[in-house]
Image (cartoon, helix red, strand yellow):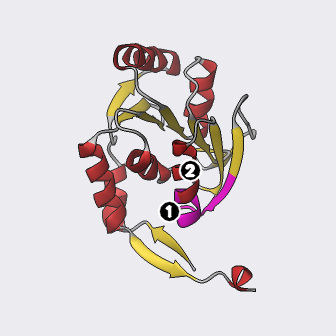
Amino acid sequence: MSTIYVMVPEVLSKFKEPFGILLRGSFSKSAQQLRDLVEKEKPPMIVSVGDTVSRNLHKHKLAPHLAITDNLNLRKKVQPQTFPGKRVVHVKNPMGTITQEAVLAIKEALRGPEPIQILVDGEEDLLTLIAVLYAPKNAFVVYGQPRVGMVLVKVDDEKRAEAQLIWKKMHKIEETNPAKQR
């Protein structure tokens, strides 16, 4: 049996606004803003969620410890990409959900010293919540804000509580997987 959390309209409205600090502008400009914050605050880890932001962070030498991607950009297929030095872990996470498989992969990736890319079959957007819940305190979780810039979530008790509240409002489904019961 596995657990799947499904998006509900009440939760969807929470994702219209940035979950953290909006770094506006081109990626070069927002990457410089992020670099300045990294140099100032020295986060224990950077986590990226999204193909474009992950690719651009690597390009600007701000390589995240964990990159969560799905080979989609604005719901359109993009050239699959893996990042040098990262072990690739595959998970299923359908659009509008958070699966137990994805949660466990993120928790494991955040605990270990090895840089990881989680490649999602489905959609990675909601996994930002899980990254915020389980990343070390003061870590930076970064995701793209289409056509505006990127969002930086500095992990602290307040952001964790906010992420937990959103996650708990999602509809929880216990799913039996017949393939695992054989």
**Which of the 4 image quarters holds residue 59?**
top right
In the rendered image, residue 130, in percent from the top left (x then y), is placed at: 44, 52
In the rendered image, residue 85, in percent from the top left (x then y), is placed at: 71, 29
Task: Give the Cα distance between marks 1 and 2.
Answer: 22 Å
Q: Which residue ends up furthest to the left in the rendered image? A: 158
Can you say which quadrant of the picture contains the C terminus?
bottom right
Residue beneath the point at 56% across and 61% down: 95
Can residue 18 be spotted in the picture?
yes
Can residue 124 be spotted in the picture?
no
Return the residue at label 1.
96
Write down the region rendered in magenta: 90-103
Magenta-colored stretch includes residue 17:
no
Q: Amino acid at mark 2?
A: Glu
**Residue 115 vertical placement versus 76 (above, below):** above
Return the residue at label 2.
108
Mark before the other along the chain sequence, 1 or 2: 1
In the rendered image, residue 84, in percent from the top left (x then y), is placed at: 73, 28
In the rendered image, residue 18, in percent from the top left (x then y), is placed at: 34, 40
Q: Nearer the viewer, residue 114 or 142?
A: 114
Residue beneath the point at 56% across and 41% down: 50
Q: Nearer the viewer, residue 33 or 148?
A: 33
Query: What element does badge 1 sit on?
Result: loop
Can you say which quadrant of the picture contains the N terminus?
bottom right
Q: Nearer the viewer, residue 25 or 172?
A: 172
Left or right: 110 as drawn, with respect to 20 = right
**Residue 162 vertical placement versus 55 (above, below):** below
Residue beneath the point at 41% across and 13% down: 39
Residue beneath the point at 75% across and 41% down: 80
Q: Amino acid at mark 1?
A: Gly
**Residue 107 vertical placement versus 86 (above, below):** below
Identify the mark at residue 43; answer none if there is no mark. none
